[in-house]
Amino acid sequence: MVSLEESRSNSSRFPLARSYQYHSSVSSKTQRHIGRSMRTIRSNFFQDDDSSCSFTEKSTCLSENLTDSVVDLRLGELASRNNKSLKSSPAEEDFLDLSQAFSDFSACSSDISGELQRLATLPSPKCVQKNNISGEVEPEPEPEPCTGFLQRESFSTEIIESISPEDLQPTVKICIDGLQSQSVAVKRSAAAKLRLLAKNRADNRILIAESGAVPVLVPLLRCSDPWTQEHAVTALLNLSLHEDNKMLITNAGAVKSLIYVLKTGTETSKQNAACALLSLALVEENKSSIGASGAIPPLVSLLLNGSSRGKKDALTTLYKLCSVRQNKERAVSAGAVKPLVEMVAEQGSGMAEKAMVVLNSLAGIQEGKDAIVEEGGIAALVEAIEDGSVKGKEFAVLTLLQLCVDSIRNRGFLVREGGIPPLVALSQTGSVRAKHKAETLLRYLRESRQEASTSSS
């Protein structure tokens, strides 16, 4: 067990050895400079120089100039306050508030991963290539002849918006029949047109589902033609936005096929498959079955290797699924913690806050706590408190509180990473929520210091 007193005395005598012994691989893991958090504890926290900055000045100034005596004074003030039980977990509303970090993207709107580029068209075989399932690049198959409505290369959104569901019913029937054709081109065109019909109108989503489209769209998720697969997965995403269609899609066996797309599809197909799983996961009982069906590992792969849009979609879906304990365990086992810590360390990427929210969820289980610490998460979170946005500071301190609430060892690591000065700064200059959480965490640290002092005497 690492006590704060041991951490402090050893760090004073050997300022680099103890920290690098534990965090020797942190730099390569998080691809960040050892930088400010380590410099803070080595050059400031254990020096006796007087600070030239007042507590009301900027957080960065406080982090750079707080001395040991000033920190002790601040900790003493906090310890003298009457406060609630320190052993209670952070309030439930904190976790509910965290979900708002995802409100600016991946909100389950139709065709979320981008504008439709090939609406109801037959792609040219001469200029379009896709990767097949084995990863080899092959040309688009030659289009097969299809007649009438399904042959049309354009499909006016204005016309669609003005037609009633009753008048569209024959059109939907033609499309559903087309999904069952032997012709790949007919299937592709039919899926593309259903995708567009379901894009914006709730009444169309009801009509298409009630007409029997779902059971014939699901098999196309395993189609070897990438365009057909992409249209089918996006059509199902759009249909899933109607609440009553979610269970219909799930009961048709779509979950495992969506996971197949998540593993094998084009970039857009993977993104829309992740969003479709997110939409289905809004039904509480689906979360466990989606995780048990194997969705977590390919979502982590998308988090690692996807585009910016794909990473955001993966983050959101993981956040929703990881409200279930078994899915937290699956995410940790699948290696989700490492890329999440790397995202936290990449301030300014636009995803640091969201990554912290998912980390906070994974910190709800012991395996998650251990993985976060092992991957250098404490250092990254200290950096976020020093350099992050207002919301980022809140999420970082709440996650650190999760890690340290029942762990003397993790409190020692937090001190060794230079966490006390920025926490003191945050308790003075942060938002109301951040101040409260920073003060609570500082009281834990003081409590540990007092226990270490008592045991040593």
Image: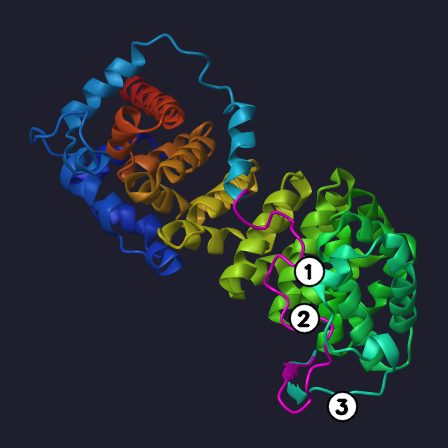
Percent across and percent down for residue 7 are: 27, 35
What segment carries the magenta color? 103-132
- Please tell me which residue is depicted at 40% across the width and 37% down the height of the picture: 391
Percent across and percent down for residue 411 are: 37, 32
Q: Give the numbered dot on residue 273.
A: 1
Any part of residue 435 in sight: yes
Numbered disc 3: secondary structure: loop
Q: Is residue 75 magenta?
A: no
- Vertically, is 139 above or below 172? below
Q: Does the magenta stretch include residue 110?
A: yes
Q: In this figure, which residue is indicated by the disc labeled 2? A: 265
Numbered disc 1: secondary structure: helix
Numbered disc 2: secondary structure: loop
Q: How far apart are marks 3 and 1 (CA)?
A: 26 Å
Q: In this figure, which residue is indicated by the disc labeled 3? A: 142
Percent across and percent down for residue 206 are: 84, 49
Any part of residue 250 in sight: no
Say whether disc 3 or disc 1 marks the residue closer to the N-terminus: 3
Q: Name the quadrant containing residue 282.
A: top right
- Amino acid tagged 1: Ala
Q: Is residue 72 left or right of residue 258?
A: left
Residue extending farthest top? 82
CB of mark 1 within 8 Å of CB of mark 2? yes
Percent across and percent down for residue 424 are: 26, 27
Mark 2 is surrounded, within 10 Å at the Cα level, by few (under 14), some (14 to 19) or many (20 or more) other residues, namely many
Q: Distance between the residues labelled 1 and 2?
A: 9 Å
Mark 1 is surrounded, within 10 Å at the Cα level, by few (under 14), some (14 to 19) or many (20 or more) other residues, namely many
- Amino acid tagged 3: Glu
